[in-house]
Amino acid sequence: MTETTPNKIFISIKSGIIATAIMSLLIFLAPYIGFPRIPIWEIIANILKMPIIFGWIIHFGLGIFFAFIYISFFKNWLPGNWAIKGMLFGLLVFFAAQTASLFGTGANGFIAVLGSLIGHLVYGLVLGNLTKK
């Protein structure tokens, strides 16, 4: 079933916000489970020399953007069920994030990279679940 563009946009916004919120919750909980806290919204705001609210807006905007990319291009192309598709896409987003971190976002070290991987896999899993229809 092909979804219309307005429907893709609505689903992207809804699922992107929810998946990003859950990933953000993991960032808040990271220090309690042995991972460093890497608040990407603060890092974005600092890099852009803007108030933290803009870091949050960009963080959620990226989550929505990637949800739209998943729904529009990857959802029907990736192999597996909704969970596998979502996590494979989360892996792609993880690689994009790691590429960005090469340019100074501050996430370095094995444990930080592992935390980022887990966070992006969870983002993809939630995204896959919310868009599985």
Image: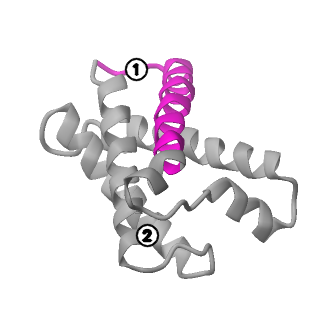
Of pointers 2 and 1, the one earlier in the residue sequence: 1
Find residue 3 and name its label: 1
Q: Residue at x 33, y 54 (%)?
A: 118
- Answer few, some or many: residues within 10 Å of disc 1's Cα (few below 14, many 20 plus, some between 14 and 19): few
Of 79 and 36, nearer the camera is 36
Residue that mark 2 sits on: 112
What is the three-letter code of the residue carrying label 2? Ala
Q: Residue at x 56, y 38 (%)?
A: 64
Q: Is residue 76 left or right of residue 25?
A: left
Q: Quadrant of the N terminus?
A: top left
Name, please, the residue furthest toward the right. Answer: 50
Provide residue 91's location: percent of width, then percent of height.
31, 57
- Answer few, some or many: residues within 10 Å of disc 2's Cα (few below 14, many 20 plus, some between 14 and 19): some
The magenta stretch spans residue 17: yes
Q: Which residues are magenta?
A: 1-27
Q: Is residue 82 left or right of residue 22?
A: left
Provide residue 122's location: percent of width, then percent of height.
34, 43
